[in-house]
Amino acid sequence: MKEQINQLITRLLDRSLAPGETLPAGTSFDSSKTVAAKASPEIRTLPVEAVPVLKDLILHEKNTDRRSEAYSILKILASQFNDTQIAYFIIDQLAREKNKFIIYLTLTGLKWSKLQLEEKQDIILQFTENKSSQIRHSAISLLGSYTTQKELIESRLIQILETSNDEYDLTYTNAALSEIGSKKSAGALKKIILENKKTDVLSSAIYALGKVDGPNQVDFFIEMIPFHKGPFIKSSLIELIAKHTTDGRAIDVMIERIKSILAKERKTNYGYGKDQQPELVHALQYLQKHKAEDTRIPALEKWILEKKVSFLDETEKKWILENCQA
């Protein structure tokens, strides 16, 4: 098994053209045609007996590239075997690892593994203070995978929001809080939303606030609609207002927002992912729940159908023609 692993690592490091492959005319390199690319699928065929061999390589291999590949294979096997003990071994070794790039890549890989972690939080928390931004960000992200000591982790994440000026620190922290945060995070997230101007920071903070305390933040979300000018931010807010508002307090803001969106023709035909809907649809779905209590709502539908159909993208048009009445 040791020789098999060593040969596999050698091939994973080989970026030359694989035997039998040819490059199209005018192309000097294609990663999918390399020896490494052809070897990569073999990782998932390795048996559990490969694990101790890889552990030994990580402990004793002096060559950085080969040690990095051993970490990479082992983290894939941790995910494949759903074995958190392998992940904890990796984290322990990262605490001793000197190569920053290996630490960053391996922490990122552990996050991608989707493993739910319960141990070694202290090491990951320490990495969130690292001078390397890549290590910090991957560690912050991995904290979202923990299912224990959430209060301790959340306190550290809130501290980052309150002290860091790095937009990526903030964005990754917001994402982690959306996974493991509680209402305790709401104040810090609201402060970010009020004070930060970066779209990624804002959108991730809004999403996180919706996850940790959405039903109790409706009034705040409504207040933020005129406060933020960016259409993507407004769209995020409208979606959360529509999702979490059970009464009619958002009728005015929804009507105003729809009129603003359709004030002029847009040169757009957005593509929407699975389970995604246009902002316009979120707003109209909310309004339709309150149609009987406000005559402005059927009048708005009539206005759209009679005067604004040409302003709609295809997804909006399909929904409106199927669900609205003139």
Image (spheres, rainbow, N blue to C red):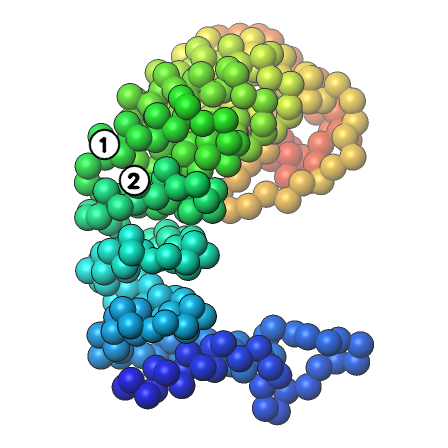
Residue drawn 22% across the image and 74% down it: 52
Q: Is residue 83 above or below residue 223?
A: below
Q: Determine whether label 2 and label 1 are within 8 Å by CB.
A: yes
Q: Earlier in the sequence, mark 2 or mark 1?
A: 2
SS for dot 1 = helix
Q: Nearer the viewer, residue 308 or 123?
A: 123
Q: Position of residue 164 (x, y in %)?
A: 45, 27
* Image quadrant occupied by the C terminus: top right
Q: Is residue 136 above or below residue 206?
A: below
Report how far apart the C-alphas of labels 2 and 1 lie in the structure: 9 Å
Residue 297 in view, yes or no: no
Q: Nearer the viewer, mark 2 or mark 1?
A: 2
Please give the label number shown on residue 125. 2
Residue drawn 56% across the image and 9% down it: 252
Residue under label 1, please give it: 152
Residue drawn 27% across the image and 86% down it: 1
| Tally of marks | 2
Residue drawn 43% across the image and 54% down it: 100
Q: Position of residue 13 (x, y in %)?
A: 49, 76
- Specify the amino acid type for callout 1: Leu
Question: Horizontal placement of 198 versus 62: left or right?
Answer: right
Q: Which image quarter: residue 200?
A: top right
Farthest bottom residue in view: 20
Q: Position of residue 96 (x, y in %)?
A: 29, 56
